Image (cartoon, rainbow, N blue to C red):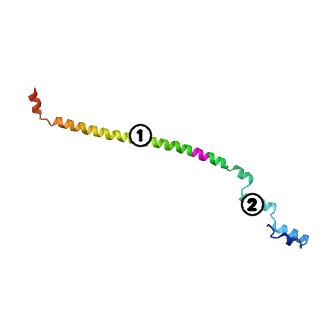
Amino acid sequence: MLFGSLTCFVHLELDEIICYFETNMLTISDIQKLTKFFATKQDIEKLPTKNDFDQLKESVLDRMDAVFGEVKVMREEQSLHFQQHDDNNLFNKAIDKRVSKIESVPVIAHEIKK
C-alpha cells in the first residue's frame, strides 16, 4: 500500500495529516519536472505499435526472400556456366589432340600422295 497501513492515520490530528501530505506528496512542479524524464501518453502514441513492427517484419522478410531467390538463381547460373567452361575445355583438349596427331604426320607423306 502507498501509506503502509491506513490505521496509522486514524489517531493523527488533521494538521498532522495535512503536514504529511504536503511534505510527502508530489507538487505540480515536481510532476512537470518528471515529465521531462519519463514518457508521457503523447510521447508513447508517437512510438510504433506491434502492428507496425509486424508489417515491417513482413516487408523485410519479403525482401529477403526475393534476394535469396535471386542469389539461388545466380548460383545455379554460375554452376551451369562453370560446367560449360569445363565442357569447352574438354572439347578443346580433344581438338588439340587430333590436330597434334594430324600435324605429327611427316610432310613427305603428303608429297607422296600427290
Q: Is residue 57 magenta?
A: yes
Which amino acid, by three-letter code, is at mark 2?
Answer: Leu
- Residue 71 in the figure: left or right of residue 102: right
Residue extending furthest toward the right: 14
Location of residue 86 (image quadrant): top left
| Residue sitting at x 74%, y 51% | 42
For disc 2, the marked residue is: 34
Q: Nearer the viewer, residue 61 or 24?
A: 61
Q: Nearer the viewer, residue 18 or 71?
A: 71
For disc 1, the marked residue is: 77
Q: Earlier in the sequence, mark 2 or mark 1?
A: 2
Which amino acid, by three-letter code, is at mark 1?
Answer: Glu
| Residue sitting at x 81%, y 62% | 27
Location of residue 26 (image quadrant): bottom right
Q: Secondary structure at mark 2?
A: helix
The span picked out in magenta is 56-60
| Above or below, comparing residue 71 to residue 32 in the picture | above
The alpha-carbon separation of the residues under discs 2 and 1 comes to 62 Å
Residue extending furthest toward the bottom: 11
Q: Nearer the viewer, mark 2 or mark 1?
A: 1
Quadrant of the rendering where the C terminus is positioned:
top left
| Residue sitting at x 84%, y 67% | 21
What x and y, as percent, mark residue 52?
A: 65, 47
What x and y, as percent, mark residue 35?
A: 74, 58
Callout 2 touching callout 1 (CB < 8 Å): no
